[in-house]
Image (cartoon, rainbow, N blue to C red):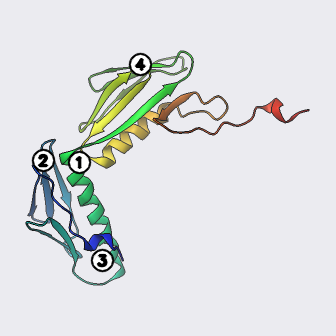
Amino acid sequence: MSRLAKKPLLIPNGVTVTVENGNLIFKGTLGTITQEFDAVLISPVVDANGVLVNRLNDTKEAKAKQGLYWALFRNHLIGVSVGFEKKLEIQGVGYRWEVKGQTLNCTVGFSHPVTFVAPDGAKLEQLAPLSISVKGIDRQLVGQVAANIRFIKKPEPYKGKGIRYAGEVIRLKEGKSAGKK
């Protein structure tokens, strides 16, 4: 049973939450997110204190869904008020990228440049020549877009060249001749 889901989610200033036809609608300064919920197991209550996620019975599935929807609702409250951001870095001789609107052009050691187009809801921003940022209000979408960009050229384990998350540590392997004496 989720202990966190028993606590109400505080609604930040500038955010409104409404319940309509099995959906919870979050409106904030950055945008609007609609989250569908399982009305058979979960009953969210919106009041002056915040959003309280109640379960309608004590089955194992209802307890699991209570914690799930509490976490999803918390992410949406943060997303429409503050937003989410993932930073990526590129490392390697001759590796570079350029952001033009929603398009990312990468030169990462292939015989051709790779073009990545970000979906609606995710914004690409170039912070420096070797780092970019993925921003948005939907936590799942921001993480998935960042993972898709990283998948273009994952960091390889011998030299560490490739696209990585900011602050990610790549454990490097020893080369073939390192074990010989």
Front-lying residue, 58 or 165: 165
Type of residue at label 3? Ala
* Alpha carbons under labels 2 and 4: distance apart: 32 Å
Amino acid at circle 4 = Pro
Q: Which residue is mark 2?
A: 28
Do residues under tags 1 and 2 come within 8 Å of each other at their CB atoms?
yes
Q: Quadrant of the N terminus?
A: bottom left
How far apart are the two marked residues, 3 and 1, measured between alpha carbons? Answer: 25 Å
- Closest to the observer, 116 or 177: 177
| Residue 62 - label | 3
Which numbered disc, 2 or 4, marks the residue that appears first in the sequence?
Answer: 2
Label 1, on which residue?
A: 79
Picture residue at 80% right of the left edge, 32% below the top: 176
Left/right of residue 113 with respect to residue 17 in the rendered view: right
Residue displayed at 39% across by 34% down: 87
Label 2 crowding class (10 Å Cα cut-off): few <14, some 14-19, many 20+? many
> Is label 4 in a helix, a strand or a loop?
loop
Disc number placed over residue 129 in the picture, else none: 4
Give the structural element (helix, strand or loop) at label 1: helix
